[in-house]
Image (cartoon, rainbow, N blue to C red):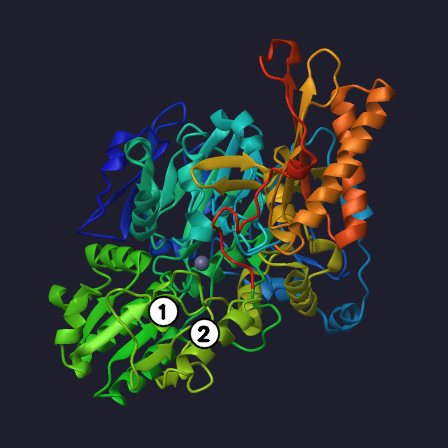
Amino acid sequence: MITTQGDREMHSNISINLSKKNNSKRTYSNNQSHTAETRTYNSRNTSSQSLYAQAVNGQLKNPTPTRRTTNSTTSTNWTTTHTRATSSTRTTNSTTSTTRSTTSKPNYTQWADKTLSSANFLKHRNQAPTQSIADLKKLVKKDEIPVRVFGLWGLEEIWINMTVIEYKDDIIIVDAGLEFASFDMHGVDYIIPDISYLITKKKNIKGILITHGHLDHIGAIKHILSELDYPIVYTTPLALGLIKRSQNEQDQKKMKYKIIDPDIDIIKLWEFLVEPFRVNHSIPESMWYAIHTPKGNIVHSWDFKIDFVPAIDKPADLGKISRIGQEWVKLYLGESTNARTPWHTPSEKLIGENLDRVIRSHPTQRIVISTFASNIWRLIQIIESAVRHNRVIFLAWRSMVWNVQLCQELWYINVPKDMIRLVSGEIDQMPDERVMIVCTGSQWEEFSALVRMATNTYKDFMIRPGDCILLSSHTIPWNEKAVWSLLNTLIDMWIDLVDEPTLALHTSWHACQEDMKEMMALLKPEYFCPIHWEALMRHAHKKIALDMRIPEEKILLPKNGQIVELYDECVLLSEKKLKLDTVTIDGKWQWHLSWEYVTKARWIMSQDGVVALIFKIDTKTRELVGNLQIESRGFVYSSEVKTIHTQIVELARAEYNKNLKKKMEIKDNLRNIKDLLEWEIEKIIGRVPMIIPMYVYINREALTTPVQQNDEEEIIGMTLEEQGGVEEK
Ligand SMILES: [Zn+2]
C-alpha cells in the first residue's frame, strides 16, 4: 500500500490533518506565515462560502483583495448589493452570467428594484462588443505586477503538459508530462518540457500539483525533480505510485510529497490558495485545480470528461465546480481534445457492459482483449468481468502488470489474487473457457504483446484459429495504416475479431462539445484560454466559447512559452515569450535538441545513407599519401557501389589537389570537397547522403617503407555484402 510517510519527512507551509472519524472536519495549518496558525474548515459549509474569502478573512497570509469590473460589452450592468467577504467590489457580466451569491441569502427584491427593467433588458440584447484589447490594456495600473501563466509545452499539443503560474517570487507548477517520440525522431525515446526558466528560479517553486497519473502529465517528474531541488509534489495515491515506479532509488528517497483528497483539501501555497476538485477521466483520482491568486481565480483543467454514471469512479464534482464558478473564475484554461466532436462522451459504464456481453457470448473460446494499459477504469472492468465469468486473467505486458499491481495495492482491484496471473505456458494446460489474455498492442506498437502474438513471435502464447480477439481501443490519430495492418493480420488467422465497428467497445477519455459547454456554463469564466491540442481543436473550443457569449477579446490563444498576464482589471496576452527548446530523452541521456545535430543527422542517414572519406596527408607537403579510403552505408545498392565510390574518390582527389595549389587550409579544403560531392552525387543518384570527410597526417620521412598507391585498390571501403551484411534483393 502507498503510505504518506513523506508527509512527515518534508517541510511544507501547510498541513492538512485528515480525521478518520469525521471527514467533514479538516484542520488547516499554515506554518510558513510569520506566525503559525490553524484553521478548521467544515467542508459542508464551503458550498455557500468563498473558500478564498474564508482564508483571506482569517489569519492566513492575505492575498491582495480582488476587484471584478463589469464587461462593457453589455451596456446594462448591475452591481450586486451584497458584498463579498473580501473588501472587493464586484459586478457581473449580464450576458454570460446571473448575479452570484457568495456570502448570504440574496435579497432578490432589492436587486430587482435597482437593476432590471424590461426596457434595459431589451436594450442590451443586441449590442455589439465595445471593448478592444487596447481598451483592456488601458486598465493595467502603473507598475502593477501581474500573475503570469505560461506553458512549458502542453498548450499546443496533448502531451508534455506543464503549466507554470508565477506571482512575484512564488511559482507553482501544474503537471510535468512527456511525449513519446514520433517515428521521425530517430532513436529518441521521448520528449520532456524545457525547464531552463525554472532552473534559474528553483528557489521560488512552492509546489508541483498533479492532475492525474498518465505519463503525459507525470512522465517528466523523474527527470525534473532533482534539477529543481525536489519541490513538494501534491498528488493522489495512484499518481504517486505511478511516479515512484518510474524513479530511481535516490529520487524515491528524496522526493517530498503530500497526498491530497480533492473532496476536502485546500492547499495554501504562499500567495496561492489551491482547491482541487474531482473530474472524470480514464484513470481514477483525476482532478483539476481552482487556483485563487491575488489577481483573480484561475481554473486549470487538463484531461477530463463528465460521467454521470461512471463505472467505478465518483461522478465529476459538478456541485463544487458550480460553486467555484459562482465565486468568479477570472481565467479558465480548458482542454480542447474533442472540441470538434459533437454531443457528450458516452459513459465508461456502457463500455463495461458491452465488454461483459461479448465475454458472455463467447463462452467456449479463449479470449484476448487488447486495450491501453493507461486506461485503468477499462482494465478494472475487464478484470471484474472475467472473474464474473470464471476466467483467469493472464496479463501480457509489463506496464499492464505494474498498473494492475498498483491498483490491487490501492484496492481498486479486489478480486482473488490467483485469478490474475502472468502469461505463461500454463495457459496451454487450462480449458479454453477459463482463459482471458489482457494485453497492449492495439495500435500495432512494435514489440507489443498483441503484435508479437499475431506474428507468432511471443514465447508463451500463440493465437490460434477460433480465438476471440477483442480490441477495446480507438485508433490514435495518424496511426490508421498500422491498425489496418493489425486487423488484416488478425483476420487472416481465422480468429473471431470483435472491434469498435462491431459494438461500442471504447469511449473517449475526453469531454466532447456538450461536456465542454457544460463546464463553461458552470464556471462562467471571464477570460478563457483553450489549451491542450493543436490549433484546429483550440479554435473549435474558441468557437464554443464565442457561442456561449464570451467576448472575443477575452479568449486568448497563447502559444507554448507565451505569457498570459492577470492584472486586477484585465487579462492580457503578453508579447513576451519564453524560448523553449525540444528536450529529448535518448536512452539514458537528456539533450536539448537545438544544441544537437544528432536527430537531424539520424534523419539524413535514414533517408540517404552515409559516406565517409579518409584523406591521408603528408605532414610537410600536405600532399595526399596513398589511396583515399571510402566507406558508405545505406547509400547505393550493391551493384552500383564500386562505380559510385570510384567517381567520388576521383572527384575528391582532383578537388583536393586543385585547392592545395591555391594553398587552401586543410579544413577549408575538405569543406569544399564536401559541398562539391553533395552537388555531384545529387546529379548522379538524385539524393544527398551524409558525407563525412576525415584526414590523418602521415610523416613520410619517418616511414621505413614508402606508401604505395595502387589504382586497382583505390577503393578500400567494403560493400555490405563484403562485410557479411544482409543481401540486397
Ligand atoms: Zn490523461
Q: Residues within 10 Å of mark 2 (few under 14, many from 20)?
A: many
508 up-or-down from 530: above or below:
below
Image coords of residue 203 (percent x, y): 48, 25
Task: Give me the residue at 17% from left, 79% from top.
Answer: 434
Residue for point 39% across, 68% down: 451
Three-letter amino acid code at disc 2? Leu
Which three-letter amino acid code belongs to the residue tagged 1? Leu
- Work out which quarter of the rendered image holds the C terminus and state it: bottom right
Reading the image, the residue beneath label 1 is: 450
Q: Which residue is mark 2?
A: 486
Name the residue rendered at 33%, 77% in the picture: 352
Quadrant hosting residue 429:
bottom left
Residue 531 at least partly seen: yes
Where is residue 497 shown, x and y percent of the image?
A: 38, 84
Q: Nearer the viewer, residue 345 or 14?
A: 345
Q: How many discs mark residues in the rendered view?
A: 2
> Which residue shows up at 64% across the image and 64% down it?
537
Q: In front here: 229 or 270?
A: 229
Give the image quadrant in which the ligand numbered 1 is located.
bottom left
Task: Name the spot of residue 348 as percent of width and height, x first.
Answer: 38, 74
The residue lying furthest to the bottom in this view is 361
Compared to residue 53, the image places residue 446 above or below, namely: below
- State the image quarter where residue 47 is shown: bottom left
* Residue 410 at x, y percent in the picture: 22, 55
- State whether residue 285 is above or below residue 57: below
Secondary structure category for the residue under label 2: helix
- Viewer-nearest residue: 141 or 243: 243
The answer to whether marks 1 and 2 mark residues whose Cβ atoms lie closer than 8 Å is yes
Disc on the earlier residue, 1 or 2: 1
